[in-house]
Image (cartoon, coloured by chain):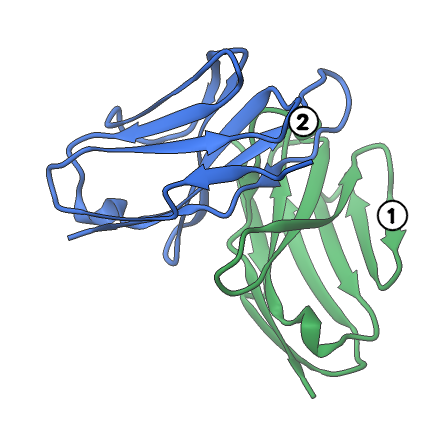
Chain colours: A blue, B green
Amino acid sequence: KAGVTQTPRYLIKTRGQQVTLSCSPISGHRSVSWYQQTPGQGLQFLFEYFSETQRNKGNFPGRFSGRQFSNSRSEMNVSTLELGDSALYLCASSPNGVGYTDTQYFGPGTRLTVL
Amino acid sequence: GENVEQHPSTLSVQEGDSAVIKCTYSDSASNYFPWYKQELGKRPQLIIDIRSNVGEKKDQRIAVTLNKTAKHFSLHITETQPEDSAVYFCAASNNFGNEKLTFGTGTRLTIIP
């Protein structure tokens, strides 16, 4: 099976712009989670989608949003970019069967640089 | 919410020696504890995980122990090799890995040849 894929791999934006990142989960996986990784804050949970619904949300401002499509692919959007949004954005997918362990598999990430 | 603390932040060991990384968690409802290895410029890769109904799990040179009472879990790597050099993250989840992982701050492990 192909792994989790993310596009684009690298992005450079300027403050105030918006950006959309894409994540394609492993075939058959229904849950997609997004994480922000920075040297200072480590890996921080953004949100998780399952069956096109946001099921969990981390402590990020409303500028960060996402969605999931019927094929389980997910997009994440950040509006009004700030310098502090520069980070590696990772998505992870899992099969998601309630009640048993679901390993999360990570994509390669999108490195966003805000100038 | 859940809070995961990880120690040490950096660890250097001689090749062939053992390495131990420790994590504590705050939410007694957490029931799934994976460990990820992240090499420079690469994605986090799951190396081992443990559920709350198990006290220890081994996979070749890697083992994880869990103490639910004390709310801490540890990663043990024996007979370390240069390719073990990486950043290791522990994490906790309260739904068997579904939905959300709360990560520790990472441990940079360096194996000295």
Give the residue at mark 1.
B56
Q: Position of residue A50 (x, y in %)?
A: 54, 16
Q: Is B73 located above or below residue B69 in the figure?
A: below
- Nearest to the observer: residue A39 or residue A49: A49
**Residue position for label 2:** B29
Amino acid, disc 2: Ala
Local secondary structure at mark 2 = loop
In the picture, measured across the screen, residue B45 lies left or right of residue A69, that is right
- Up the image or down, A77 lies above or below B80; here it is above
In this orientation, which residue lies closer to the viewer: B112 or A94?
A94
Which amino acid type corresponds to the residue marked 1 in the rendered image? Glu
Which chain is home to disc 1? B
Farthest residue toward the bottom?
B113
Q: Horizontal placement of A68 versus A30: left or right?
A: left
Of labels 2 and 1, earlier in sequence is: 2
Please provide percent x and percent y for residue A95: 68, 24
Compared to B99, does B107 lie above or below? below
Task: Residue at 54% x, 58% y: name it.
Answer: B106
- The answer to which quarter of the image holds residue B52 is top right
Query: Is disc 1 on the same chain as disc 2?
Result: yes
The reply to whether callout 2 and callout 1 are in contact (CB within 8 Å) is: no
Instruction: Say which quarter of the image contains residue A4.
Output: top right
Position of residue A27 measured from the top left corner of the image (x, y, whole percent)? 64, 26
Give the distance between the C-alpha atoms of the residues marked 2 and 1, in whole angstroms: 18 Å
